[in-house]
C-alpha cells in the first residue's frame, strides 16, 4: 500500500527567511521578521524593438542592402533599491550562531535615512540610531526595514540584418549595457561591527557599485 500525504497552505509554517543562508533566531523566529532580501517597492521595466524605417526609401541594389534591416532595441529599468540587511557578527546573544550570523543590533528609533546620494561619501543611514546588543540579549532591530539606492539603467542594441539568400542572413549587433554610464550603487554596509565612519569604519557607507558601461559588438550568421 502507498499512502499519500498532502500539505495545504493553511498547514504550512510561517516563513521568516529569504533563502537557505538567511538564518533566523532559533528561539523565536518572529524576531527575524523583515523585508524579503530581494524586495522591490517599485520596479518598472520597458522593453522595445524599433525597426528603423529606412526600407521606405525604396532604394535597390547594394545601396538598398546597406540601408535596409536596421533596428534598435533595448531594456530600460527603473527600480527602488533592495533592502539593507542589518547584522551583528559577534554573537553577543550567546546562541552560538557564528557560521551564519543571526544577531542584529539595537535600534533606538528615529529617522533612519540620512544622505541618500552615495556620491557625497556620507552615511546613507543614521548609524547613531543603532548600537550593539547587550551580552545574552537579542537586538530589537528588524534586520531589513528600509531600502538602499535604486536602479536607473538603460541597455540598448543596434542591429543590422542583411539577407544573403532566401534562408540565410548575416546579423551585426552593437550592444551597450548601462548605456549612459550612470552609477548604479550597491547597498551600504549594514554590519554594525564594521564601525561607523566617525571611527574609521564603513558601517552605513556605500562602498561599491554595479558595472560601469560595457560595450560589445558581434556578427552572427543565421541559416
Image (cartoon, helix red, strand yellow):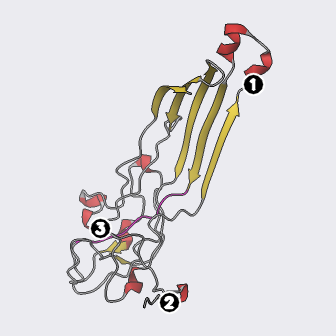
For the residue pair 208 and 43, the one nearer the viewer reads as 43
Mark 2–mark 3 contact, CB under 8 Å? no
Q: How crowded is mark 3: few (under 14 residues within 10 Å), some or many (20 or more)?
A: many
Residue 42 appears at what percent x and percent y? 60, 60
Determine which residue is flagged by label 1: 53
The stretch drawn in magenta includes residue 126: no
Determine crowd level at label 1: few under 14, some 14-19, many 20+ residues with C-alpha closer than 10 A: few
Which residue is rendered at x = 46% and y = 84% of the image?
A: 14
Q: Is the magenta stretch mostly helix, strand or loop?
A: loop
Circle 3 or circle 1, nearest the eye = 1
> Which element carries disc 1, helix, strand or loop?
helix
Q: Nearer the viewer, mark 2 or mark 3?
A: 2
Over which residues does the magenta segment extend?
80-89
Q: Nearer the viewer, mark 1 or mark 2?
A: 2
93 relative to 162, above or below? below
The front one of 77 and 104 is 77
Q: Mark 2 points at which residue?
A: 11
Side of 85 relative to 99 (left or right): right
Q: Residue at 36% of width from left, 69% of height from top?
A: 86
Q: What element carries label 3?
A: helix
Residue 192 circle label = 3
Say the numbered circle drawn on residue 102. none
Give the residue drawn at x 46%, y 35%.
Answer: 213
The quadrant in which the N terminus is found is bottom left
Q: Classify the position of the C terminus by image quarter.
A: top right
- In primary-sequence order, the first of circles 1 and 2 is 2
Q: Give the CA separation, mark 1 to mark 2.
A: 58 Å
Q: Which of marks 3 and 1 is nearer the N terminus?
A: 1
Circle count? 3
Q: Which of 160 and 215 is in front in this view?
A: 160
Amino acid at each position: 500500500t502507498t499512502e499519500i500525504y498532502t500539505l495545504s497552505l493553511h498547514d504550512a509554517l510561517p516563513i521568516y527567511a529569504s533563502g537557505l543562508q538567511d538564518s533566523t533566531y532559533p528561539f523565536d523566529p518572529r524576531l527575524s521578521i523583515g523585508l524579503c532580501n530581494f524586495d522591490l517597492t517599485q520596479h518598472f521595466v520597458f522593453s522595445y524593438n524599433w525597426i528603423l524605417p529606412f526600407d521606405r526609401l525604396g532604394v535597390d541594389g547594394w545601396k538598398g542592402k546597406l540601408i535596409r534591416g536596421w533596428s534598435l532595441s533595448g531594456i530600460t529599468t527603473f527600480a527602488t533599491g533592495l533592502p539593507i540587511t542589518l547584522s551583528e557578527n559577534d554573537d553577543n546573544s550567546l546562541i552560538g550562531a557564528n557560521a551564519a550570523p543571526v544577531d542584529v543590533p539595537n535600534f533606538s528609533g528615529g529617522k533612519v535615512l540620512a544622505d541618500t546620494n552615495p556620491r557625497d561619501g556620507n552615511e546613507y543611514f543614521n548609524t547613531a540610531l543603532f548600537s550593539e546588543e547587550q551580552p545574552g540579549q537579542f537586538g530589537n532591530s528588524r534586520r531589513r526595514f528600509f531600502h538602499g539606492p535604486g536602479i536607473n539603467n538603460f541597455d540598448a542594441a543596434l542591429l543590422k540584418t542583411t539577407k544573403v539568400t532566401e534562408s540565410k542572413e548575416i546579423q551585426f549587433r552593437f550592444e551597450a549595457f548601462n548605456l549612459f554610464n550612470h552609477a548604479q550603487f550597491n547597498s551600504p554596509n549594514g554590519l554594525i561591527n564594521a564601525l561607523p565612519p566617525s571611527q574609521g569604519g564603513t558601517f552605513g557607507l556605500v562602498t561599491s557599485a554595479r558595472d560601469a558601461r560595457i560595450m560589445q559588438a558581434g556578427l552572427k550568421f543565421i541559416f
